[in-house]
Amino acid sequence: MKFCSNCGATVELRIPPGDSLPRHVCATCGSIHYVNPKIVVGAIPEWEDRILLCRRAIEPRHGFWTLPAGFMENDETTAQAAARETLEEACARIEVGEIFTLINVPHISQVHIVYRARLIDLDFAPGEESLEVGLFAEHEIPWNEIAFRSIALTLQHYFDDRRRGTFRFRTSDLAPPPPVGTA
């Protein structure tokens, strides 16, 4: 950030009085501009023994598979965000259930929240951000083509819990991936 969104003056990075972290502070009007983590919300849309996955038509991870998910918008709840993202990415309507996973991804300043959900019907199709969508049984999941580690982890927990016959809320912290070219 170089300029204040309130007055347009130059900002400087410094620790404001009473704070402990460097913030962008406007030297003219004194506004403090906080940069906070982004919340990504999604759903595991269930239909009988299968779940709905979307193949991404956008970066990052174009062409890879994921659960319908995306950034939460202002003025919506996390459950509303899960339903909206599912409608946008898979043209699918869901009944949102309980939160299933909350995964902290601090190295990219994100928090990923995924709900269990029930597909209301089989009327779904690729949205603008999806190349294709489909229902997958566990043995059909394209594990080597899952777009994000948080989604792979969520799916692993989901199928483990389903085999146990009971679902529980899961939390995890994802460390940064190893640098490319290292073991």
Image (cartoon, rainbow, N blue to C red):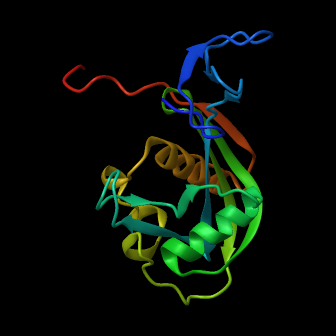
Q: Please tell me which residue is depicted at 45% across the width and 78% down the height of the picture.
A: 127
Using the image, determine if residue 8 lies above or below residue 135. above
Residue shown at the point (62%, 62%) measured from the top left: 43
* Residue 169 higher or lower than 68, as above or below: above
Q: Is residue 70 above or below residue 107?
A: below
Q: Nearer the viewer, residue 175 or 21?
A: 21
Residues 116 and 1: in front is: 1
Percent coordinates x, y for residue 53 in the rendering: 46, 67
The residue lying at 47 percent from left, 62 percent from top is: 138
Residue 166 visible in this rendered orientation of the protein = no
User: 86 left or right of 94?
Assistant: left
| Residue lying farthest to the left in this orientation | 181
Q: How many marks?
A: 0
**Horizontal arrangement in the rendering, residue 24 relative to residue 63 (left or right):** right
Q: Which quarter of the picture shows residue 97?
A: bottom right
Q: Is residue 123 left or right of residue 76?
A: left
Q: 78 or 155: which is nearer to us? A: 78
For the question of whether residue 25 can be seen, the reply is yes
- Above/below status of 90 relative to 24: below
* Identity of the residue drawn at 58% across and 76% down: 87
Question: Percent x, y for residue 103?
Answer: 61, 38
Q: Where residue 84 sits in the image (x, y, percent)?
A: 64, 70
Quarter location, residue 45:
bottom right
Horizontal and vertical percent for residue 101?
66, 46
